[in-house]
Amino acid sequence: MPEGRAIVTGTMTALAGLGAILTTLTLVWLLSVKLRDASIADVCWGSGFVLLAWLYCLLSPTLTSRSWLVAALITLWGVRLSVHIFRRNHHKGEDPRY
């Protein structure tokens, strides 16, 4: 193990992911309250998966080509999902289900 690099356990990684996603979704919620539009959470949903994929890659003690591939595929899927939902809901106001 390289000197100066802390050992990151699975529990620490999971807690870091939990903290990151809770912080992000809390900020999205605060923005939705300010805008009076809860449906913006739908647009951010795919991006949350992207955030977690890259966070877990960065915190991983070993990065393989498979790790990079999975993170890249999650990024493509998450961005596609967010863009699709944004286009579908843009200028339509809050979703009536909320």
Image (cartoon, rainbow, N blue to C red):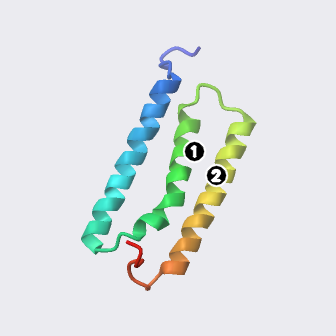
**Badge 2: residue crowd in 10 Å (few <14, some 14–19, many ≥20):** many
- First along the sequence among labels 2 and 1: 1
Q: Residue reaching furthest front?
A: 97
Please tell me whether residue 21 is drawn above or below residue 86 in the rendered image.
above
Q: Please tell me the numbered disc located at residue 53.
A: 1
Please tell me whether residue 79 is drawn above or below residue 22 in the rendered image.
below
Q: Residue reaching furthest bottom?
A: 91
Q: From the viewer's perspective, tell me whether residue 60 is left or right of residue 94.
A: right
Q: Position of residue 89 (x, y in %)?
A: 49, 79
**Badge 1: residue crowd in 10 Å (few <14, some 14–19, many ≥20):** many
Q: What element does badge 1 sit on?
A: helix
Q: What element does badge 2 sit on?
A: helix
Q: Position of residue 31 (x, y in %)?
A: 30, 65
Q: Quadrant of residue 65?
A: top right
Q: Please tell me the numbered disc located at residue 39.
A: none
**Residue at (55%, 51%) from the top-left corner?**
49
> Circles 2 and 1: CB distance less than 8 Å?
yes
Q: From the viewer's perspective, tell me whether residue 21 is left or right of residue 76.
A: left
Screen quadrant of the C terminus: bottom left
Q: Position of residue 36 (x, y in %)?
A: 28, 74
**Residue at (54%, 79%) from the top-left corner?**
88
Q: Position of residue 80 (x, y in %)?
A: 62, 66
Q: Amino acid at mark 2?
A: Ile
Please tell me whether residue 56 is drawn above or below residue 33 in the rendered image.
above
Mark 2 sits on what residue?
74
Q: Quadrant of residue 69?
A: top right
Q: Amino acid at mark 1?
A: Ala
- Numbered circles on residues, count: 2
Task: Give the Cα separation between the discs numbered 2 and 1.
Answer: 7 Å
Q: Quadrant of residue 67?
A: top right
**Residue at (64%, 52%) from the top-left corner?**
74
Camera-side residue: 58 or 12?
12
